[in-house]
Image (spheres, grey):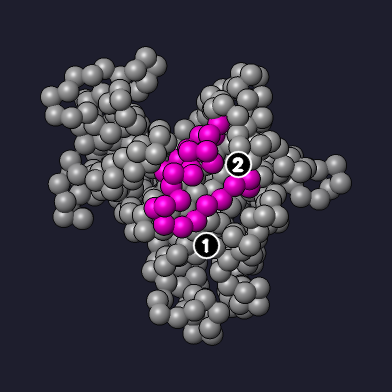
Amino acid sequence: MGQGSAWVQNSWQALRAKASGGLRLPPRRKGAVTALMVGERCLAVRLASGGSDGRLRLVAASSGGPEVIPSWQRLAKGSTPVLVLGARERQIQSLDKPQVLDSELAMAVRWPAAAAQDVDPDELLCTALPLPAISSTARQQVLAISSPLATARQHLDTLRAQRLDVRHIDVIDSALLGILRLQGNAQEACVSIAAVGGSLCIGLMWQGQFAALRSLALPTGQGRQGDDFQDALSLHIQRSVDSFERQATLLAIRHVVLSLPAMSYAGREGVASSVPADTRIFDLEHWVDIDDSLLTLLRGHEELHALACVAACRLLAPVAVTAKASAETSAAKADSAATTPAAPAAPAATTADLPPLQMPSPAAAADASGPRGIPAEPGATTPPRPGEKPADQWMLQP
């Protein structure tokens, strides 16, 4: 399944203020990321650098059934494509940290994760994120994130059939960190919340990383604008914030950030005012340049908003190695044409937001003919491509 959205651990970059003293934005990595979701609803968002005042640009988006997937090859060309798993396709658990090396955590948590889901460990993709201590009395914990291997394989095969070679898998929860990075938030403790389809992703953020993560099912059978829905949503949020505050004795939650794009402005204001903590409403259009032709499609669409934030999480990650000037130039040219990008450019190498994903067959090499990280067929001995990591080192983040 790009240390964790379910999965983020990163130091924050220093903030850069605009000369006018307005929005403060973190340094941007050049390039583009295309976030993809596959299933009954197929969604894609391409986010790139080069917007006004150093902001990111949302240059393409797609929503529909499986019939829209063939158009994604052109949409994603020249960018880093990322398969994003939804809330129903991944499981999150907080576990006591196993007494193993950090490099072995993903392997160690696979068995308790499989036991909790009553499945064979070999049927799971797993990764593990060490969590910062938020209480002086709590034992050290890790966040275990898992997904059925069959689910990831099916989605990757679907994309591969359309000549989309996807090498990275993420989860929708990474949108929570993307929301904070887009706002240039520092390391103070806060709660980040995003409504995505039928789920509410809630993260306690501290020092630029997840300190806790949970997911709640939203009420079904009612619209987003009714008073009953707003009351239920407010209750979910307040209970979560209260729970975090009781557990986190080493920090003070400064504010709550809400991403509720499917609700009316009045509805969002009503939910925000019902939460006793300092609550801020996140509006993607305020932080990302969005082409006018995409505003109608994006407006009120929770999944597309979340995918854009997952892409932002990656684009705003600290850069470990600067890409060659020629690669950056190619990426810039690709995005200047938006839906008609130029030839693919090598993405910039970055630090990993998430630890390595452990595959069911950790000794197996990646299939040289398919996406990295999918185990080779039984008995296959194909070595990894030059410079590639074996399957047990496949990353969720680039």
Residue closest to the far left: 379
Residue at disc 2, secondary structure: loop
Residue 302's label in the rendered image is 1
**In which quadrant of the rendered view does residue 191 lie?**
bottom right
Looking at the image, residue 184 sits to the left or right of residue 165; the answer is: right
Point 68% across, 51% down: residue: 291
Magenta-highlighted residues: 58-83
Can see residue 187?
no
**In which quadrant of the rendered view does residue 342 lie?**
top right
Between 46 and 234, the residue placed more toward the observer is 46
Q: Could you tell me how far apart the alpha carbons at marks 1 and 2 are, in whole angstroms?
A: 22 Å
Name the spot of residue 209 as percent of width and height, x first. Answer: 51, 46
**In which quadrant of the rendered view does residue 106 lie?**
top left
Point 49% across, 64% down: residue: 195
206 relative to 226, above or below: above
289 relative to 260, above or below: above
Q: Is residue 66 magenta?
A: yes
* Residue where numbered disc 2 is placed: 339
Looking at the image, residue 30 sits to the left or right of residue 161; the answer is: right
Residue closest to the far right: 20
**Sooner in the amino-acid sequence: mark 1 or mark 2:** 1
Between 354 and 276, the residue placed more toward the observer is 354
Name the spot of residue 101 as percent of width and height, x first. Answer: 31, 31
Point 35% across, 38% down: residue: 161
Between 89 and 162, the residue placed more toward the observer is 162
What's the residue type where badge 2 is placed?
Answer: Thr
Between 191 and 250, the residue placed more toward the observer is 191
